[in-house]
Image (cartoon, rainbow, N blue to C red):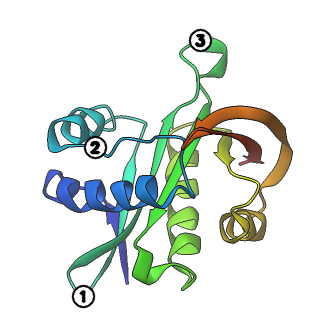
Amino acid sequence: MIIREAMETDIVSIKELYNQGIEDRAATLEIETKDQTYMEEWFAKHMGRYKVIVAEQEGQIVGWSSLNPYNSRAAYKRVADLSVYISRDHRGKGIGGLLLQSIEKLAIENDFNKIVLFTFPFNRMGQGLYKKRGYREVGVFKNQGMLDGEFVDVMAMEKLL
């Protein structure tokens, strides 16, 4: 398993895994899959402090993680929002932990002191991963968003670096 910074040539694979997460309704409030143009614009915003890394196994991208802006106010410049997506066929095999370890190191190198993330309370696999890496539950936003016509809660988690 190779964990490395993402390159432009990885965008198609990153998009596919992101769209799996959207379709599975387990990792994001996004409801519409993303196209290549959207992902190219998204990737372009991750060239500075906000990094994207990938997990590559036998030449195939099987997971990715990114540091994203949390809030545009200057007071929050040292806080990053986190995304982690793993291929359906590779979930629960330790890839998420490897990605978290690497993205946290990059966060520290890029002067972040805290990572926040938002997950669904029913996503026990994700919560287990985050808790293993030292993230703590901050609280639950009730009826924070809608998926398939139903309100869903969203759990906030954080880790001080």
Residue occupied by mark 1: 58
**x, y (%) of residue 48?**
35, 34
Give the numbered dot on residue 73.
3
Placement of the N terminus among the 4 image quadrants: bottom left
The amino acid beneath tag 1 is Glu
Closest to the observer: 107 or 16? 16
Residue in the picture at 59% in, 72% down: 97
Tell me the crowding category of disc 3: few under 14, some 14 to 19, or many 20 or more residues within 10 angstroms, Cα based.
few
Give the numbered dot on residue 48.
none
Residue occupied by mark 2: 34
**x, y (%) of residue 114?**
69, 40
State the SS at label 3: loop
The amino acid beneath tag 2 is Lys
Closest to the observer: 23 or 45? 23
**x, y (%) of residue 117?**
65, 45
- The earlier-in-sequence mark between 2 and 1 is 2
